[in-house]
Image (cartoon, grey):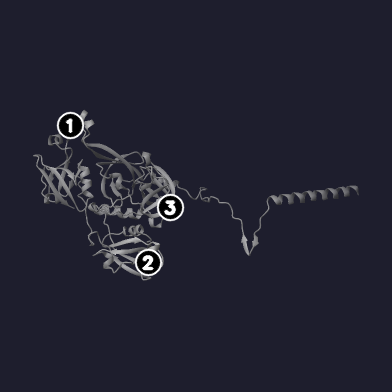
Amino acid sequence: MKNLITIILFSTLGGSITYFLINHSSKSAEVVLPIVENSKEKIEKPEFTLTKNSQNNRYELDFTSAAQKTVNAVVHIKSEYEQAYHSDPLLDYFWGPKGSRGFRPAIATGSGVIISEDGYIVTNNHVIDDASKIIITLNDGRALEAELVGSDPNTDLALLKIDEKNLLFTEFGNSDDVNLGDWVLAVGNPFNLTSTVTAGIVSAKSRNINILRQNAKENIFPLESFIQTDAAVNPGNSGGALVTPDGLLIGINTAIASKTGSYSGYSFAIPSNIALKVVNDLKKYGLVQRAFIGVIIQDITQDIMNELELPNTMGVLVSGLSEGGAAKAAGIKINDVILKVETTFVNDVPELQEQIGKYKPGDNVNVIIQRDGNEKSVNLVLRNENGNTEIINNKINEDKAMVYGAYFKDVNENKLRQLGIVSGIEVISIKKGKFEEIGIEKGFIITHINKKAVGSKTKFINTIKNKKGGILIEGQYPNGIKGYFGLGL
């Protein structure tokens, strides 16, 4: 009997202890139930977490593949050019009268993106502008001289070519598909540090920052519609790649917003859709086939919306029409609002310019306009700057030494001194072509184009390739007779 009582006491004590432990532990892991208040549930949100890739146990946001692919398609560019120096009295004291005057070598550097396995490279025009020699250094260390296929100051783009095969290259992505907040990588060679990769997000699109200056005499009408990112870009990144996490090229890094000259938080890239149009035109025609609607346009502000009684500020206002332009021919009127180009909405001037910049003269483009509160579809036949649909082919003969029927060579230092000139190139042969038509003869030494000194044959040919309208050629014959010729291009 005593044993039975003992067993019951211990059992009761054990149950009490177990109950206490369970009750105590449940408080530390208490489940919070939803509290119903005013018929709405308040549910605690979980902490933010990183989502992992279940396949390879890496984070889903993985840039390694895109970075490894892109660094091999981005090149370092060294541009050699000749900088003109005027006479310096102090230096002339040591070098003799006018000894300091003339040309001295200078170097600029930047980046470029290989876009084909046979060596085509896209970069910024300002990286290679006026270069007499362009050296490309591949990511594996090989250095090759590049030929300038063509350049476009309107978009600050240039197309180069190196004589190489089986190169790794970057494929073009669709920049129209890029959204605010998308992750991007910037790959280039800042401060001559090769193969540098930085990451950021797209912080804005269709930015116009007015870095490309209009020059009607040189037929430069800038097209700016930059992708803005916060990926770190510094001097030397110009011409480099802006790519998606998949490694697709969606921009050419071009500029930074900075008061110091170094990265301060924002960088700007030319959209890939514009770059693709430009490089295809340069390759095929030697210059960009720029298309125009024939309108004067402006953004719609609150004041304009109120004044014209528009339903909202969406679209781009037509405030003027060009005589003989595509818009007037298609029936577009002043105060019409352009809402879409094909299937793409346009809400400001840079967006509209970007969309039209994809086309060439003669292309049919459908635009949606708003007039008197109603939407209307209009078909435009785009025209060139001369008001027609002609395609201009400025392709130079593939023989690098020949331009418009004339062959050239650099003039050596001894001959320059004998003739009393600082620099120039000599016409060594003339065949049927534009140079023969304007009267230039064999032996003529070209010293200036449009009042700018000519430093070398390569620089001269590169300049001629990318001029439109006309140029003034100055020089002299070996007997001292000077010549001035106007060459229409």
Report the disc number at residue 172.
none
**Residue situated in front as seen by the camera: 33 or 230:** 230
Residue farthest toward the right in the current orientation of the protein: 1
Q: Is mark 3 on a helix, strand or loop?
A: strand
Quadrant of the rendered structure where residue 359 is?
bottom left
Residue type beneath disc 2 = Glu
- Residue ID at (38%, 53%): 227
Looking at this view, name the residue that lies furthest to the top.
94
Location of mark 1 (residue): 97
User: Element type at marker 1?
Assistant: loop
Percent coordinates x, y for residue 448 in the rendering: 18, 44
Q: Which mark's residue is nearer the viewer, 1 or 2?
A: 2
Q: What residue type is labelled 1?
A: Pro
Q: How many angstroms separate mark 3 from mark 2 (CA)?
A: 32 Å
Mark 3 / mark 2, whichever is N-terminal: 3
Q: Residue at x 33, y 65 (%)?
A: 367
Label 1, residues with CA under 10 Å away: few <14, some 14-19, many ≥20 = few
Front in this rendered view, residue 67 or 86: 86
Q: How far apart are marks 3 and 1 (CA)?
A: 56 Å
Picture coordinates of residue 20, whole percent (x, y): 76, 50
Q: Residue at x 39, y 66 (%)?
A: 306
Nearest to viewer (mark 3 / mark 2): 2
Measured along the vertical axis of the image, is residue 226 above or below residue 364? above
Residue 365 visible in the picture: yes
Q: Residue at x 85, y 49 (%)?
A: 9
Question: Label 3 is placed on what type of residue?
Answer: Ser
Mark 3 sits on what residue? Answer: 203
Q: Count all numbered tags in the image, as a single digit.
A: 3
Q: Sequence-wise, which precedes: disc 1 or disc 2?
A: 1
Q: Where residue 307 is drawn, which disc sits there?
A: 2
